[in-house]
Amino acid sequence: MPDGNPPDQIEAAVRAVLGTLSGDLTVTEAALLGELEALGREVKRAKSEIAALSVEDINESHIPAATDELDAVVEHTATATNEILDACETLEALQSKLDDGSAQALGNAVTRIYEACSFQDITGQRIAKVVSALKAIEARVAAVTGSFSSLPATVGKKADATEGEQLANGPQLPTNASSQADIDKLLASFD
Amino acid sequence: MDKNLNVLIVDDYKTMLRIIRNLLKQLEFDNVEEASDGQEALSKLRTGNFGLVISDWNMAPMTGLDLLKEVRADARLKETPFIMITAESKTENVVAAKQAGVSNYIVKPFNAETLRDKIEKVLGHA
């Protein structure tokens, strides 16, 4: 069988089998021939369908555009968070000029803003997960459009990853995430 | 609790470093240094004198868990209190960190009270 992509190999196989058939066909040979012709048509149809999908666009423009947009989201949230933190630091500096009650109230409010600003880290990590999913899709699409040869191994964690890298899962969805109370309980179970 | 001790905070998100630094300031910890990954943290720890490490997990080129293992394997650093503050909330993560010798574990998003509570626990035992 000649080297090449599986569809080409199938076509070559069909031609090779047809070439061996000569003279009157038996019923079995005729059925086989029919099957092979149908197979050939299927391969041709699949090829033109894949071509019509313009899957190249996915890798040439859609995925790069999507990852660029997501990178920009992370950048915007970082800039805005730094602005918010600037403002909080200015407010905290005013505490000494206020009476105790007001200073306390302002301090509490600023603390809550600090706590809330961790959204930038959490959302950034979630977006990084989406970007790596998009890159995995990009690799698969490249494999399909490049040839019908076997797909590359799943894009995943490298084989020599440390335990820290292997367990770097990023934020879990709320339904799967352990709470601080769950974690405290788990840690206490070791004592 | 000695609030003059040097604290090393480690996170690859600058905003998170800034948040933790500000929360520490409210708790009157003013001697705070920063590192943005485990490797940078390790070299600061080896050349400095830190009484507390507060580290994220998910960083490159060295994760917080790998930093913790390096710290616990280093004769001079091994007793340093080490708090993990991370979005990694799976049981396997908490178990791995505990086995590596973590002093306490805070899941993101966290609040100031949790941070204060864990620091008090860890430094109380130090």
Image: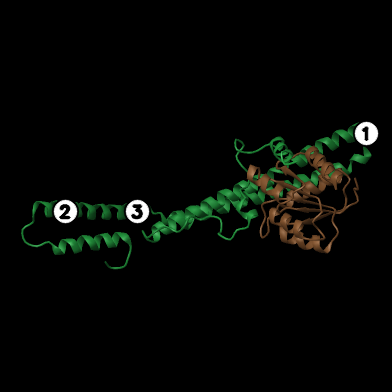
Chain colours: A green, B brown
Q: What residue is at 85 percent from the left and 37 percent from the top?
A: A107
Give the amino acid at mark 3. Ile
Alpha-carbon span between mark 3 and mark 1 = 71 Å
Alpha-carbon span between mark 3 and mark 2 = 27 Å
Judge whether residue A127 can be spotted in this image: yes
First reached walking from the N terminus: tag 1 or tag 2: 2
Residue A50, label in figure: 3
Query: Where does the image place residue A34, in percent across and percent down from the top left?
Result: 16, 52
Per the image, the residue denoted by label 2 is A32
Q: Quadrant of residue B60?
A: bottom right
Give the amino acid at mark 2. Leu
Q: Residue furthest top?
A: A101
Judge whether residue B37 can be spotted in this image: no
Per the image, the residue denoted by label 1 is A100
Q: What residue is at 69 percent from the left and 53 percent from the top?
A: B65
Q: Are marks 3 and 2 on the same chain?
A: yes
Q: Secondary structure at mark 3?
A: helix
Query: Where does the image place residue B111, in percent across and percent down from the top left?
Result: 76, 39
Mark 2 surroundings within 10 Å by alpha-carbon count, few (fewer than 14), some (14 through 19), many (20 or more)? some
Q: Secondary structure at mark 1?
A: helix
Tell me whether circle 3 and circle 2 mark residues in contact (CB < 8 Å).
no
Tag count in the figure? 3
Query: In the rendered structure, the residue with mark 3 lies on which chain?
Result: A
Query: In the rendered structure, the residue with mark 2 lies on which chain?
Result: A
